[in-house]
Amino acid sequence: MRLVLPLVLFGACTPAVAPPDVALRLQTLNIANGAGDRFRTSEMRPRQAALIAEADLVALQEVDVGVFRSGNTNTALALGGLGDCAMAIAAPPHLSPDGVLSCSSDAGTVLFGLGFRGNDVFGTDGSGVPGGIMDADSSLNPTSVDRSPDALFGNALVVRRARVESAVVVALPMDASPPPLERYAALANGPPDELAAHNLAIRFTPGIEPRSVLVVRVDQRSLSVLATHLESGSQAALRAAQLSAVVAIARGEQAKGRRVVLMGDLNMIPSEATSALSDAGFTHAVGTGADQVWVENVLSVTSPEDRPTEGASDHAFAPVATIR
């Protein structure tokens, strides 16, 4: 029987919240569930948790929830240190229609944003059989493909010292065509059924791997945090289209009077992202490689650090910065 972790609705618990003028520590980390068995062991998770223990808002990429290769657990919760959320139940994940799974306790909130399910057919070979979530590393476990509808893969955000107001996940383009920017700007604040239909359609569009951005609104500074992981490899044009969609979503949040932070694995160096992000009022806070933190110019940045992961990820650094 597959074990997954329960949903606790926003407001069910009240995390300790910092006063509005207190600094918040931001961090991003790729936890490398897609990079091999050595990153998916129970021994590795405490090392990853230690890397993010002091941050208030942590974007995580390559997050497995209920996937065979990582022990059918919620790997974001395993890192977040939310003891009240750690009890597994024998039930399907209680996702919102657009694909958000949330769990709160007095210690904070962990939110997962769906990229794709094991039974999505974006990667079908023409036979109609889903590509699934693969474990191609046979060094520790038998090689497998998890095609269960309960197997989830995507991004997550760990929230400490801030109260979550709402969260949505928006699927990003699957091809390099210029995305409909007005539509993306409206999706995150539009009718939930339209967003759910958009996300489902993207996950059933032929492509390499559906990508998404998790949009989490917290009460500190009316802040919207965008956590994402863009296309990798040689797909530069597709990455650019996905970044354009993320920027459009950020502009939609700005239009609602919110300050915006973007964190994640952009799979490009900062200079490649500068043009699109600076035009939207962002400045590069930290991250010299693919893992980066960008903040709106109105936010003050201090203590940026490319923190070495020391083997706890296949990425060398987990960038950290403080905002006021």
Image (cartoon, rainbow, N blue to C red):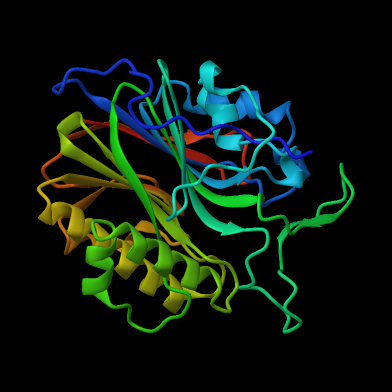
Q: Residue at x 60, y 32 (%)?
A: 5
Q: Nearer the viewer, residue 259 or 131?
A: 131
On screen, 184 above or below 290?
below
Residue 55 located left or right of residue 180: right
Instruction: Name the spot of residue 303 as percent of width and height, x first.
Output: 29, 29
On screen, 288 above or below 15?
below
On screen, 138 above or below 157?
below
Q: Residue at x 56, y 73 (%)?
A: 204
Tell me if I can see residue 172 in this picture. no
Tell me if I can see residue 252 in this picture. yes
On screen, 138 above or below 199?
above
Residue 126 located left or right of residue 46: right
Instruction: Name the spot of residue 205 as percent of width and height, x first.
Output: 54, 77
Q: Quadrant of residue 316?
A: top right
Instruction: Name the spot of residue 289 as percent of width and height, x first.
Output: 45, 52
Residue 300 located left or right of residue 235: left
Q: Residue at x 58, y 42 (%)?
A: 93
Q: How many numbered discs sit on the rendered protein?
A: 0
Q: Residue at x 65, y 27 (%)?
A: 88
Please identify the quadrant where the N terminus is shown.
Answer: top right
Please identify the quadrant where the C terminus is shown.
Answer: top left
Q: Quadrant of residue 179?
A: bottom left
Q: Quadrant of residue 3?
A: top right
Instruction: Name the spot of residue 28 as percent of width and height, x first.
Output: 44, 40
